[in-house]
Amino acid sequence: MQNLIINEGYKKGVDLFYGAQDERIFTKNKKYIDLSMCAGSILLGHNHKVFKKSIAKFISKKISNIAAPNISAKIFAKNIKRVVPNSEKIIFCNSGTEAVIKSLRLARAINNKKKIALVTGGWHGSVDQLLYKTNKKLKPVKLSSGLPEETYKNLILIPYNNFKKSEAILKKNRKNISCLIIEPIQACLPYENVGKYLKFLEIFCKKNNIILIFDEMITGLRTNCSSVQNYFNIKPDLSTFGKCFGAGLPIGIISISKSVTRKINKINPKVFFGGTFSGNSIVTFVGNEVLNYIIKNKKKIFKKINTNSKYLQAELNKFFVSNNLDLKIYRFHSMLRLVYTKNSIKDRASRDFLELKKNKLISKFKDYIKNKNIYIPSSGIMFQSYSHEKKDIDYIIKEFKKGSLKIFKK
Ligand SMILES: Cc1ncc(COP(=O)(O)O)c(C=O)c1O
């Protein structure tokens, strides 16, 4: 229970991080190649020159934070719409969690229905209504104590990328479902046919007055300066973003589609969105400066991070196959995860089941990699940034090869 309450990093004796530059993070004693990049929030690298300049500009222009509608938020919202063309309205929040909570609230206000359909395998932050995983029978299993009973009662689980089962469950419950929320791409899962699955959800939701929410906290901006919805040409009703848009500062964003905006304008629901730091000037100003740079340089930025990621994946998978190791790297653009089995996995539950058997070896491997000064976050999701160089990737490949042979070769 302790780990659930207090961050693991604060256990006694842990070498705490104090800073970072480019692709490295530092503790007092060590420098690591960072494969977390602030849980996928930093696309350019730590303390990138554009980030530093924008902070200096913020100070020299005496912008400060004003808890009132401000010009920085307005400009940033306009710019976000350039990379999320389906967006008509933007609501700023302070975290991804807050954006998800408020989008669930907005959905309920629009159609006045109770139930939430949650597609399994994703993560949506510290949201009471969604802090569940699934068991084999698709029943919700709590991920935290302290969750109110109604959250369990109102939750319907839909198996990710499983057309037949998803359709059957949705049909049975469609009249009561307010919204369906999905993390459209999950780093650790294969995504063949996901485009078709997402299209099916879009059509089903539209037909049945269900608000479709894409949680693109990770994939927003990281997907070639755009999003998964653009990549697959889907128009979700609401989308939640954050991470890269904040350039390493805390942010959450709700994007409301054109069609839902029209609906809202008709029914005019009273939905509370406010907060002291919602749309604050520091995050929106810095986020906008960094976003401008990313848009301007998108070709070279995404070419580099995607090429490095592809190379890392290809080299390691080739090695795992030729050495008959039961491992496989999955990747979507610049996010990767080592899955500790080469067996086919169709969803998160099947991955967890196969990995569970190897827990001890996995933790040995993670220790090995950390000892080689490579930092992988506990989720196992590895993010590339524009600051990672080919030599870093070669070093990671070398150590992953050595470590996997040492620990997993039978
Ligand atoms: C897909 C997704 N949704 C929501 C969240 C929650 O965002 P935050 O940690 O900013 O509250 C996360 C965070 O990792 C996420 O990956």
Image (cartoon, helix red, strand yellow):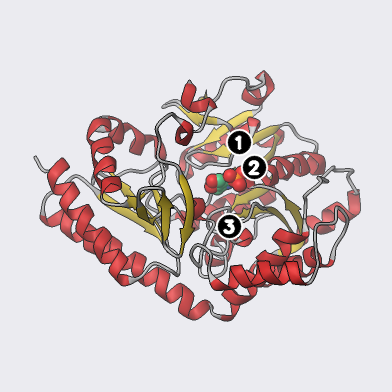
Disc 1 CB within 8 Å of nearest ligand 1 atom: yes
Nearer the camera: disc 1 or disc 3: 3
The type of residue carrying mark 3 is Gly
The type of residue carrying mark 2 is Thr
Image quadrant holding the C terminus, namely top left
Which one is nearer the viewer's eye here, 226 or 387? 387
Gap between marks 1 and 3, in whole Å? 19 Å
Disc 2 CB within 8 Å of nearest ligand 1 atom: yes
Give residue 248's mark: 3
Circle 2: element type: helix
Q: Is residue 64 left or right of residue 85?
A: right
In percent of the image, x 30 and y 65: which residue is there? 393
- The residue labelled by disc 1 is 126
In percent of the image, x 81 and y 40: which residue is there? 109
Label 1–label 2 contact, CB within 8 A: yes
Q: Is residue 166 left or right of residue 241?
A: left
Horizontal and vertical percent for residue 80?
A: 69, 67
- The residue labelled by disc 2 is 97
